[in-house]
Image (cartoon, rainbow, N blue to C red):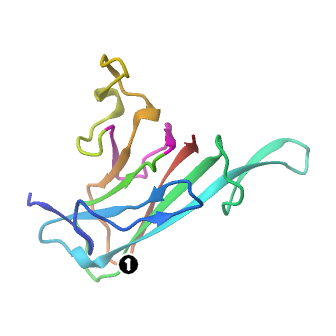
Amino acid sequence: MGAMKTAGIPFRHSGALALLGVGALCAQAALAEGGAQSCVQLHNDVQMEQKYLDAQGHEAVRVVAPAKVIPGTVMVYTIIAHNSCKAVSDHLAITNPVPEHMHYLGGTPAPEGSQMQYSVDAVHFGKLESLATQDADGSSRPARSEDVRSIRWTFVQGLAAGQSVSVQFRATVQ
């Protein structure tokens, strides 16, 4: 397999969307060399969870456009990849950092046909249980969801022509 390249942007750099001082959201799509690099467009969306009482008086949660964002607010990050070409984009990978001042909330399911990997340093990726990090005193410990700094979704089958796929994660404002 060749070197990884992104859809229209350098692999290690991407644009960012600032949101209400919460942090930055940026995603990059990587395709195997020889794939349709310029065919995959990404759309980023950030919303917040809002608690409310439903018609039966039970507490429920809905996702709404960000309004007042304070520590403890749960933000929902959605990245949609769309293949606008007439050919399959092989080996699609979407990488997104967890914005600064945010803690990733574990439990995000991987879309069908994809694998999720995590990074505590935005360089080395693996399953969360295989990662380690250091505490303030320098001692090593197993990584936890709040240590995650980047998330990568890899679609082994790629993305068919005209197809879209979305990935999502939740994080809490610190």
Residue 14 x %, y % = 32, 65
Q: Would residue 63 be found to the left or right of residue 165 on screen?
A: right
The three-letter amino acid code for the residue at tag 1 is Gly
Residue 106 x %, y % = 49, 37
- Give the magenta range: 101-120
Is label 1 in a helix, a strand or a loop?
A: loop
- Closest to the observer: 41 or 98? 98
Q: Report the residue at 57% width, 42% height from top.
A: 172
Above/below status of 19 relative to 42: above
Does 109 appear in magenta? Answer: yes
Q: Which residue is mark 1?
A: 162
Residue 92 x %, y % = 27, 62
Q: Looking at the figure, which quarter contains the C terminus?
A: top right
Q: Would residue 169 be found to the left or right of residue 158 on screen?
A: right
Above/below status of 109 relative to 128: below
- Closest to the observer: 26 or 157? 26
Q: Would residue 31 be found to the left or right of residue 102 on screen?
A: left
Name the outermost residue toward the right: 56
Q: Report the residue at 23% width, 59% height from top.
A: 12
Residue 125 x %, y % = 26, 41
Above/below status of 3 relative to 110: below
Does 102 appear in magenta? Answer: yes
Q: Report the residue at 67% width, 63% height from top.
A: 65
Q: Looking at the figure, which quarter contains the N terminus?
A: bottom left
